[in-house]
Image (cartoon, rainbow, N blue to C red):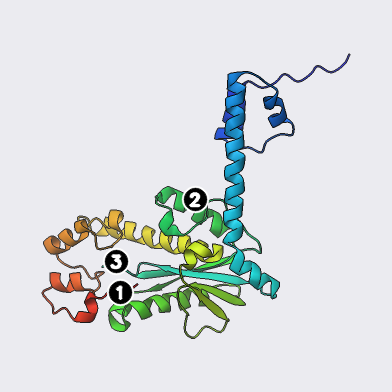
Amino acid sequence: MPEKARRPLPLSVLRERYVVGSSPLPPGLLAALESDARAGAQALLSSLRARASKNRAEGQRLRNMLKFESALYTEGYKQIAGVDEAGMAPLAGPVCAAAVILPVGYKLRGLDDSKKIVDEARREVLATAIKAQAVCWSVGWAEVHEIDTINIYHAGLLAMRRAVEGLTCAPDYCLVDARRIPVISAPQRGIVHGDALSLSIAAASIIAKTTRDALMNEIDQQHPGYGFASHKGYPTPEHQKALEKLGALPIHRRSFAPVRRALGLEVREEQLVKLR
């Protein structure tokens, strides 16, 4: 007997699978919906076309964010490290930097500058994917006493250098957010707003941000009342009120003006100037 024709799936199942679940579309689905006059079928078709348009836009965005890497690939560079830091502006805690070497042509949907991704859980999902799929990655730190000794700008560079030196596979080129790292042997390029323009730097920004945030969550458990889990050490009104009420901790940066005020120390003019 001839094989029975496969029964079409209900529209509700198709929507759940291909709109909500974003599974790859099977051949012929759009054509079948185009010939289906039902209002539900036409609504599903519209949703799938919107999804396709969104996917094309995301693909183009990711290609644009690989333009620096792609130019270096054509010059023969393959081990390209993106480097970025997190934690320059906070009043408390260390600076964390990350260096990440992505596979050639790597694209990860949703990967962007960490500052643009406000959902903490989403950043964690991206960080997990990057760590699993990167050629290699590393983090480096500059501690509070180093920040207070050599100043925050140079401490950020020190953390970046440590991140690059911690890579288990040596980079043949480094793309760095906004700066140039002293001492490292690999050629490098500083890109202003690089975390929004280079996929490698964006990946480093995600790793640095999530790693430092995790540490500040631990510090919140050790020092309740300061709100470190919410503000991560940044100079929010909540943090500054807690600083005035509870006093400075060893993890507070004595070279930063609000901390010095809370301790009754002299505030020098250079401590009133913003870093970046």
- The residue indicated by pointer 2 is 125
Which numbered marker is on residue 90? 3
Mark 1 residue type: Val
Q: Residues within 10 Å of mark 3 (few under 14, many from 20)?
A: some
**Residue 216, horizontal then vertical, whole percent:** 33, 60
**Residue 226, horizontal then vertical, whole percent:** 21, 58
Residue sticking out furthest to the right: 1
Looking at the picture, tell me which residue is in the foreground, 263 or 60: 60
Disc 3 to disc 1, C-alpha distance: 11 Å
**Residue 26, horizontal then vertical, whole percent:** 71, 34
**Residue 215, horizontal then vertical, whole percent:** 36, 61
Q: Residue at x 57, y 32 (%)?
A: 47
Quick one: SS at disc 2? helix
Mark 2 residue type: Val
Q: Is residue 133 in sight in this rendering?
A: no
Position above or below: 54 against 181: above
Left-right relation of 200 to 250 = right
Which numbered marker is on residue 144? 1
Position above or below: 16 against 234: above
- Tell me the quadrant of the picture where the N terminus can be found: top right
Left-right relation of 91 to 25 = left
Q: Residue at x 49, y 68 (%)?
A: 194
Earlier residue among tags 3 and 1: 3
Earlier residue among tags 2 and 3: 3
Mark 3 residue type: Pro
* Circle nearer the viewer, 3 or 1: 3
Quarter assignment of residue 116: bottom left
- Tell me the quadrant of the picture where the C terminus can be found: bottom left
